[in-house]
Each structure stands twice: as structure tokens, then as C-alpha cells.
Amino acid sequence: MTNYLDELGGARINVYLGGYGCGKTELALDAALRIAAPGRKVALIDVDIVNPYFRSSDKRVWLESQGVRVIAPVYAMTSVDTPVLSPAIKSVFDGRDERAVFDVGGDTAGSAVIGGYAERIRESESRVWYVINTSRPLSETAEDNVARINEICLRSRLRPDGLIHNTNLQHETAPEVLIDSFRIIEQISERTGIPVAAVTGEARLAARLPNGMRGLFVGIGRRTVYSFI
């Protein structure tokens, strides 16, 4: 795999998978903004119908002012607690002039939803990213994460192209937190065969990371970092 940002910009469809609270929404939002920046058309698709509160949808007005079309479940951010997927999702596969970023619901329940689009995603020029935050419950060990990856891959019918190290303690994150977590993520990569594609965090952390991590580091701008916490 080449540079994460090159892969991100080159793919027509980017999909973000992972467990609850790992930071998929933040990274999907950041990806959509990066893709839109050169003037490309891009849609951010929220396919989480498990959680009744849709964070991507909550940022719809601001995102659309930045050139990002938001496709959210029907009834998202309303009093109706049985949201359904928007039929507009089909448009991102049928049209060739728009990129797409999928923000998938957490764990197996959320990932099963994207499984219905797996064949269309595989047929497209796509990249699937698996986000890991080892500071979250049930994500602290390599064993826990490998088991979850296997379950999510089975339910989503997609295999990740790369792991994204997104461990953080919000604004209290120290370089040591990222370094300790990176050892775990390397173990996950060895056991699954999925390469580590990126290490994310606030730009202030990059200079204090070892060279191997620094080469993978992608700074998440303050326009998105922790914006949903």
C-alpha cells in the first residue's frame, strides 16, 4: 500500500469500519473535506441506523457549505427512532463524477448494514479502512481487536485495505499513548495481514513520535478533531 492520503484521494469510494467510539465519523468527515478541497464532488454517506443520533447529519449545513453532500438515514435527527437508509445512496454508485465516503455504524450490528452494498463497493475503485482506538473498552488488546475485525469483516462482507491507528485520550493525548498503542496495532497487523495505513492525531504530536510512526502520521485538523465529543 502506498501513502494513505494518496490512496484516499485516488479512490472513488472510501469506507470506514470499526468498533463503537473508535473515531470513524471524525475520520470520515476529515476524508470528505480533504477530497472536496481540490474542487471534487464528494458525498459523505451516514449508514448508521443503529444509533438514533447521527453526528454526520448534525453537521450537514456546515459540511454542505464546504462542498460535501451529506446523505443520511431517513428520519435522522428526528423524534422517529426507526431510521431507514436513504434511497439516495444508490446515486453514488450510478454516477461517476462524484466521490463517496461511507461512515459505517459500529461493531457487527452497524457493519451488517454496509454488507448490502458490498458487491457494488468491491466493483468500484474503493478503499476500506478499519479504525482502531485501543483506549476504548473491549479494544485494549490485540486479541480483542482481531476477534472484532473478523466479525465485522464477516458481517460487512468487506476486507479492510488498511488499519488506521486512531488511539487518543482527546486533548490529553500524549505521544506515549500513541507509541504504546502502536505496538498493539502492529500485532493486529501481523495476525490479520492488514497493513497499518496511518497514525492519526493532532499535529502537535508528530515531532515526538519515532521515525517509523512519523512516516505514517496524518494530522487531523482542528476543524474536525474531537468535534463530535
Image: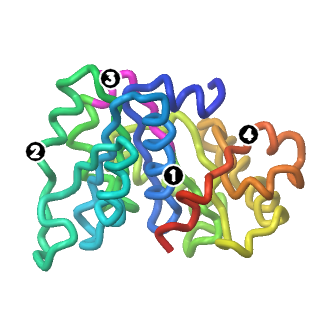
Please name the residue that numbered disc 4 is placed on: 216
x and y percentages locating residue 36 in the rendered image: 43, 36
- How much space separates mark 1 and mark 3, taking CA atoms? 21 Å
Disc 1 element:
helix
Residue 124 belongs to the span the image colors magenta = yes
Q: Label 4 sits on what residue type? A: Leu
Q: Residue furthest front?
A: 65
For the N terminus, the quadrant is: top right
Assess disc 2: are there few (<14), some (14-19) or many (≥20) residues with their C-alpha within 10 Å of its C-alpha.
few
Identify the residue shown where x is 51% and y is 61%.
23
- How much space separates mark 1 and mark 4, taking CA atoms? 15 Å
- How much space separates mark 2 and mark 4, taking CA atoms? 37 Å
Query: In the displayed structure, does residue 87 sit left or right of residue 224?
Result: left
Mark 1 or mark 3: which comes first in sequence? 1
Q: Label 2 sits on what residue type? A: Pro
Q: Foreground residue, 160 or 207?
A: 207
x and y percentages locating residue 38 in the rendered image: 48, 29
- How much space separates mark 4 and mark 3, taking CA atoms? 26 Å
